[in-house]
Amino acid sequence: MNKNLLYTAFAIFVVATSLGSCIDVEYTYEAENGFDDRSQDSASVTVDTLQGIDVSMYEQARIFPGLVDTLTEMRIDTIVTFDLSKTYVDNSSAAFAQIYGSDGRIESLPQPIYSTGVFAGAGELVTIVVPDGTWGLTVQVGMQTDNLGDGGAYSREPIVYTRKTLYPGSNRVRFPLGGYVWIIREPDVTGSEVCQLEFRNVYAAPDFIMDVTDPDGWKQQVQNTTVPWLDIRSKYVAMSVDRTRMENYITIDSDFADNLNEVLHTWDYFMEYYYAVSGHTPDNEKVADCMPPFQQRFVFDVQLVDNYVMHNLNEQGVMMMKNTAFYDDLLELTTVKYGESENIYLALLDRLTANYVPYSSDWTTAFQKIPIFRLVEQTGCLSDREDFLMNFEAALSYASADSSKTLSIDRWVNSGDYDDYDGFDEDILRLLVMTQIGKIGLDIGNEEWEFHIDVSEASRAAYRTTKTDTYYFRALCDYYKINFTPLYDHWGITLDDADREYASNYELPPREYWKINPANTSDVFANVDDYNKSSFRYRHNRSSWEIWATENSYRYENDDTEYTSESSFHTASLLLDGDITTYWHSYLDEKDRDNQQDSPYELPYYILIDMQEAQTVDGVYFGNGRNIRYVSGITVQYTSNTSDMSLDETSVEWIDVLSMRQTRTTGLNNVVFYDFDQTISARYLRIVITDANLLTYDENDEDAAVAFETYHKNRRQSFSEFGTYYYK
């Protein structure tokens, strides 16, 4: 995946439509122009030139980031307290990926930045007093740190921030453009855990702090101040926004300020859920497993590097253009509660990508959707997310049907659309499976979603770079001490024989967990019945089996090997590989290619199997895979002999145990199970193919019928899987 998430207007439109939406959001990009249009006779603020202010860049500062009215705005001296006890964890320790920007490798985890709630006026001298013994702090004036470069048209100055290292004692900083003040700490900062810095000759920025700021007082402050920028912050997010935009929201929506606490709490829910999926939880004793304590920052600007409208190339946070779509994604209550902030989600998903995960790439999108689902569930908005509800309903119907499905095949056979089977999206189907697994904890006394957190922690601890479904499935069985094969079978998720054998060491699930319905918020287990364990088929592990396909004389192999590469051969071993998309084909000897005649072997055909040791067998299964294949009549036989013998032994007494017939209309779709009339004990099996194949021809076309009977009736006998099973 491209770690550099570089958004264009087109890309964001694609994101908005692809993730699904219940709210119609018009993604227009009316980014404000910072150029002076000369429509005013003078600046909109008054300037006190008696304070020793550097006015050399006043005109540029008035354009961006904006000026404070130095005659009406009160300067203050204030003390701000910082918690330096927070442990900063870098990307490598937390096992997150890193973003590669134009300036080299930079980190993507939230940086150790502290908002101060103060603003440095343009060109004004600010004093910061640092306590004795405190080392490792830096002051940054200006939130927007994109360097626009040396060329092109600018909506602001190319560089609109400055930084200065702080030392114990008095430190002075003056920046001609001014800006909001941040404090940045080094990971190994020294000093008191509770650090108080004194700021002199600054202005109070109208920050909104979750559960601290009074909404009514904040509205008045926003409407009465001329400080142009502020931070809106919670425990896990901080949004650097312009005051004018906040004043517009307050004017348009009388509840905007009152809703901010709920908006920020909702974002904190999302961040906790997002980190939890990758195995990071708040206050975890293990530093590498602890949720990063610093805030994920979103910074608005009037122009970004290379004219992106949003990007992740800045280590300090997600940089965003000032436009209504992005502001609504962050601050509009309905949008946030309903999980409709698609632009922000995609930015975070790309920025906080785990290096070590317990699942294969097929599951990536499903895992990324878990925080969104949990968010709308937490906020009570799930009932209005039709994209989830409709897909869940169709997927649950699919899972309840039977246990002989193969998801990767069904999405093609039944609809012809790779991403859509009978009304559901495959990624949301997988999300539903992950949600059911998360809910199972509630049924057996564990915490909800706890498994996902623990398995992600374990995956990171093991530095797992190979993403396989085997790891996840076995970890699931180990965690709950349950054989989850029935769950996977009902969802059509492929398991290999070794995984089935591994899971068989545990008890089968007590209930039909594939019927858990997260959309039924009153009782997700309402339709979950007890599981009839006696009906479960334990498939034998075929990994050591020997198999041989031959024609009726036992003299020749009967495999289709008429290809230049062995990887294209269709040998009998493919019947045992667990991959329903690979097939055995009978041999075709094209002796008269010029006359388009072929000379296949005469029926019957035989496929012989040595299971290496005597097995208790209650039935067999066949698979045809993606398409209806060609085998019509099959008889399964066994011999009572269990001692060593060669598969080409002709003097064997074979006993019929099953005869199966199919037509072109019924065929074998996916996997079909056939119970024997009675349990047998056998080591050797023989499959006998007795009838002409099921190749389609026009029965009303006499020439076609003749051609079929002459050239094709035995041609290409074929199917994809064969195995045995037993009951307990």
Image (cartoon, rainbow, N blue to C red):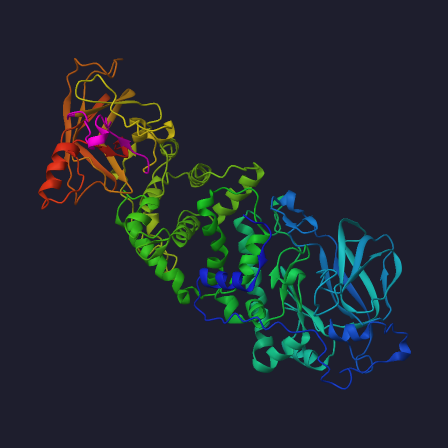
Please say whether residue 589 is one of the residues in the magenta stretch: yes
Q: Residue at x 68, y 81 (%)?
A: 223
Prevailing secondary structure of the magenta residues: loop
Closest to the observer, 309 or 74: 309
How far across and how far down the image is residue 626, in percent? 29, 42
Q: Residue at x 18, y 39 (%)?
A: 695
How far across and how far down the image is residue 633, in percent? 15, 33
Please say whether residue 316 is one of the residues in the magenta stretch: no
Q: Quadrant of residue 116?
A: bottom right
Q: Which residue occupies the extreme bottom position in the image? A: 41
Q: Residue at x 39, y 65 (%)?
A: 386
Direction from residue 347 to residue 437 in the image, left or right: left
- Is residue 429 among what the camera can see? yes
Direction from residue 251 to residue 644 in the image, left or right: left
Q: Is residue 251 above or below residue 643?
A: below
Number of labelled discs? 0
Direction from residue 234 to residue 543 in the image, left or right: left
Q: Which residues are magenta?
A: 581-604
Question: Which quadrant holds the C terminus?
Answer: top left
How far across and how far down the image is residue 355, in percent? 57, 43
- Is residue 88 among what the camera can see? no
How far across and how far down the image is residue 358, in percent? 50, 41
Closest to the observer, 659 or 266: 659
Q: Quadrant of residue 202?
A: bottom right
Q: Is residue 392 above or below residue 336?
A: above
Direction from residue 475 to residue 154 in the image, left or right: right
Closest to the observer, 403 or 102: 102
